[in-house]
Image (spheres, rainbow, N blue to C red):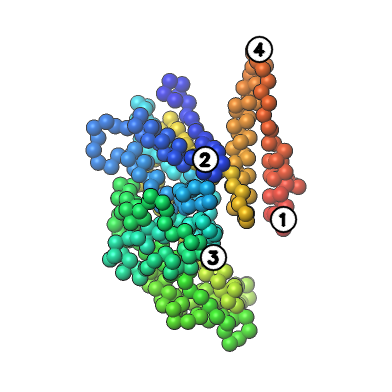
């Protein structure tokens, strides 16, 4: 990069559980060491880049069948360097956060780490947010896995708070973040029963009413407005505003959709806050990008998210094939270099099947 003035990108690929996230962390530590400022104290850019890892892992990683710390989002870290090769800024871009995990998990997986960390927080935090054991929350007790071998959630909670300090998230902002996390846990415990009218629902019992009030208190909103938002649907037409009630099944779907949206917005806010805190260098002309994205996945029950993840990996594999095999071998042919042809599987047909217009799978899904 310094000698030729060319920016670089590092793509870390492999199936789920292969070690991509750990490899990415090693790469970032190495780049931070090379581009660091020796003897500089305080919150340096390279420190903030490194400490962004545990923060994003707490909110974007979870235990899966194959991996105790699986990235459930894609991440591209763009590290900017000045003309002397020192780190001058960085930007983190995230993709495809697995929103469905917030509401739905299966044995022996876990939800996002932050929920368990908060349940293991110091007593004053647990009392403040009216929390308890993970077993008492619907979004966590769908799986019988609550702890990770060799990992203390209480210790990780404190480590995450320290990392947040370093990346520039204030105590007040940290308080707001974990207040939202607690609100999502309470939101998941709101159950519904059939109402008196056809296709209507009401809050099931006093326990659900308690969780509704706690959710409203933590989100700083009116409890009645929150209840109406969960059990009613409002449709706006040019002529009028139509309000219709939801049956218990659709009210649960409405509750889960709200939880997923809140969590997704929270995650995006944390990423944006880290980027603002680290700062970008508008004058930098030298960049090294590091991509850490989900590996290929195949579960007993696969969803549209697995389809998107595996399609992304097919695109990355094609990029790798294009540069390592096709372009290199074409260059050998042009320069009349004596070489042995290397067989490789060209996955262009797979990509055409998925993305080609007008008959590709994605185009057909858009039409449906």
**Residue at left offset 51%, top offset 52%:** 64
Dot 1 surroundings within 10 Å: few (below 14), some, or many (20 or more)? few
Per the model, the C-alpha gap separating discs 4 and 1 is: 50 Å
| Mark 3 vs 2, N-terminal side | 2
Q: Give the mark count.
A: 4
Residue 257: which numbered mark, if any? Answer: 3
Per the model, the C-alpha gap separating discs 2 and 4 is: 35 Å
User: In the rendered image, which quarter is residue 1 located in?
Assistant: top left
Mark in the foreground, 1 or 2:
2
Q: Which one is nearer the viewer's eye here, 85 or 300? A: 300
Per the model, the C-alpha gap separating discs 1 and 2 is: 36 Å
Q: Which residue is mark 1?
A: 367
Residue 209: which numbered mark, if any? Answer: none
| Mark 4 vs 3, N-terminal side | 3
**The C terminus lies in quadrant:** bottom right
Is 245 on the left-hand or right-hand side of 353? left
Per the model, the C-alpha gap separating discs 4 and 3 is: 59 Å
Q: Which residue is mark 4?
A: 338
Q: Which residue is mark 2?
A: 18
Task: Check disc 1 and report its element: helix, strand or loop.
Answer: helix
């Amino acid at each position: 990069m310094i000698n030729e003035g060319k920016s670089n990108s590092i793509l870390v690929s492999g199936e789920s559980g292969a070690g991509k996230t750990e490899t990415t962390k090693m790469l970032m530590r190495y780049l931070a060491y090379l581009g660091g400022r020796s003897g500089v104290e305080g919150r340096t850019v390279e420190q903030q880049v490194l400490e962004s890892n545990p923060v994003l892992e707490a909110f974007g990683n979870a235990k899966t069948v194959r991996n105790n710390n699986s990235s459930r989002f894609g991440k591209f870290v763009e590290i900017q360097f000045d003309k002397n090769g020192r780190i001058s800024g960085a930007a983190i871009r995230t993709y495809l956060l697995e929103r469905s995990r917030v509401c739905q998990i299966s044995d022996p997986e876990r939800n996002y780490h932050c929920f368990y960390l908060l349940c293991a927080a110091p007593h004053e935090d647990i009392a403040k947010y009216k929390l308890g054991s993970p077993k008492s929350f619907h979004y966590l007790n769908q799986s019988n896995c609550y702890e990770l071998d060799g990992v203390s959630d209480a210790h990780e909670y404190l480590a995450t708070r320290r990392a947040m300090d370093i990346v520039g998230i204030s105590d007040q902002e940290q308080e707001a973040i974990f207040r939202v996390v607690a609100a999502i846990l309470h939101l998941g415990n709101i159950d519904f029963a059939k109402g008196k009218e056809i296709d209507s629902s009401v809050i099931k019992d006093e326990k659900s009413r308690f969780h509704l009030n706690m959710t409203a208190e933590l989100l700083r909103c009116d409890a009645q407005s929150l209840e109406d938002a969960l059990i009613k649907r409002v449709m706006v037409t040019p002529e009028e505003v139509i309000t219709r009630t939801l049956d218990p099944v659709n009210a649960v779907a409405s509750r889960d959709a709200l939880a997923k949206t809140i969590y997704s917005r929270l995650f995006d806010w944390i990423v944006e806050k880290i980027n603002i805190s680290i700062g970008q260098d508008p004058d930098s002309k030298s960049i090294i990008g590091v991509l850490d994205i989900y590996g290929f996945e195949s579960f007993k029950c696969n969803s549209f998210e697995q389809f998107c993840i595996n399609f992304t990996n097919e695109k990355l594999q094609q990029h790798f094939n294009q540069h390592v095999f096709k372009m290199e071998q074409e260059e050998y042919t042009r320069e009349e270099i004596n070489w042995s042809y290397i067989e490789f599987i060209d996955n262009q047909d797979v990509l055409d099947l998925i993305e080609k217009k007008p008959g590709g799978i994605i185009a057909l899904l858009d039409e449906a």
